[in-house]
Amino acid sequence: MAVADHVDFPTFMEGVKRRNPGQPEFVQAVQEVAEDIFDFIADKEEYHAQQILRRIAEPDRVVSFRVCWEDDNGNIRVQRGWRVQNNNAIGPYKGGIRFHPSVTESVLKFLAFEQTFKNALTGLPMGGGKGGSNFNPKGKSVREIMRFCQSFMTELYRHIGADVDVPAGDIGVGGREIGFMFGQYKRITNEFTGVLTGKGLEWGGSLIRTEATGYGAVYFLANMLAAKGQDLVGKSAVISGSGNVATHAAEKIVQLGGKVLTLSDSGGFIHDPDGITQEKIDWVKAHKTHRRGRIEDYCAEFKSATFTAGKTPWAVPCDVVLPCATQNELNGDDAKMLVANGCIAVSEGANMPTDLAGVHVFKDAKIMFAPGKAANAGGVAVSGLEMSQNSGRRSWSEAELQQMLKDIMAGIHERCLTYGDQGGGYIDYVKGANIAGFKKVADAMLAFGVV
């Protein structure tokens, strides 16, 4: 292949921006990976000749469709739905479905791109995909949500399958929504297959799936600390979010001897200097899940806490940080403040919660920083185990699954060390995760030829 095909990093990124106008989240995700991959492939002619990075940064397909549904007042509503199937070089497309007004094609393309590397890091045979809709489930009745989910699946079902594409839940999509969608899939196809994960235990679901993302992020954090001869005992933690990932991350921090100081939602954050104990975490779970309440109500229940409206919790001094809310919630200035306040480690529970400026701050300060594609892979790892259980018509015990989750997170940590060790005691986990994930997918693509 001609030397001209060895484009440099700026030229590559210009091409990505040109081909994806108005999609900043996707461009950001590609840039974060490409920064590390270009150095790695500099002397590897085959990757250049086969245009591997260019091909990974172009989804296999983006399916867009209209979703019509009827609200409780008889009004016809119209939403837009998507499924982005990014890459299936190592297994069926795998990734969640998100229902939130912020959902766009750009957001789903970035998530599917990230998912490709995250799934590769787990060691399980899963490709990368993501889907969703700009439907907002907040304020909707259960029957309205059911009708929307059924309409959404009526379009999506033709693009998925147990050996094709296996969606799961994400923001706005929990067990209830998965149930409605699975019921519609079964109704249309007359098949009972493992086409969705995050299912109820009674009909093919897996134990610890709910806990897996939050627990996994803390297990990865514990692995980073152990590599430095430290643990979580006595360490203070600042956590954003108050949903599934955040509350279970808080729960595992407490179990491992740490002290959780904050949780948040879109309205602001609570700071409890006495520590958010298991009893308080259980209250938050019930309040957010069953009563659909706001995090500020915590302060009326627990007088030791204060609520700060319209702010993120990054100004609170702490030892470790787990951003578990949403993308780009932690920026460069936030990162500088955390470093100045003595933060030693960050483990991303959400997908790309730290923007590029923040990532560069953490890397320049050489603190322990685990990107989401490594740290929050626990959720999809247990989803992959659910797929295995469905295929084998069996289930594993909670103890077996907990051990498998710990082993998978330890394996991801080891893969990051392989390519991220910079010498002098510094591990660049971003670089390690990007290269390890890329290499597995890229080598599979080379084996298949130009397809």
Image (cartoon, grey):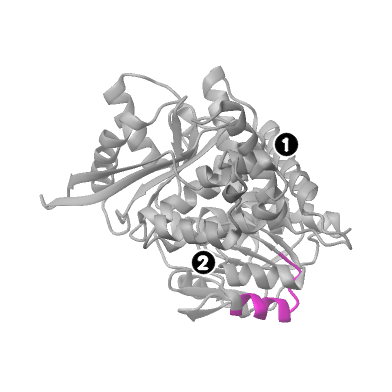
Residue behind mark 2: 328
User: What is the quadrant of residue 34 in the picture?
Assistant: bottom right
| Mark 1 Cα-neighbour bin, 10 Å: few <14, some 14–19, many ≥20 | few
Answer left or right for 287 relative to 407.
left
Which dot, 2 or 1, sits closer to the camera?
Answer: 2
Question: Does residue 265 appear anywhere in the picture?
Answer: yes
Q: Range of the magenta residues? A: 333-345
Label 2 sits on a secondary structure element that is loop
Image quadrant holding the N terminus, namely: top right
- Is residue 271 visible in the rendered image? The answer is no
In the image: residue 8, left or right of residue 320: left
Mark 1 is on which residue type? Gln
The picture places residue 222, in percent across and down from the top left corner, at: 76, 54
Disc on res. 403:
1
Q: Quadrant of residue 247?
A: bottom right
Compared with residue 142, is residue 310 higher up or lower down, i.e. above or below? below
Q: Which of 228/192 is in front?
A: 228
- Is 280 positioned to the left or the right of 226 in the image? left
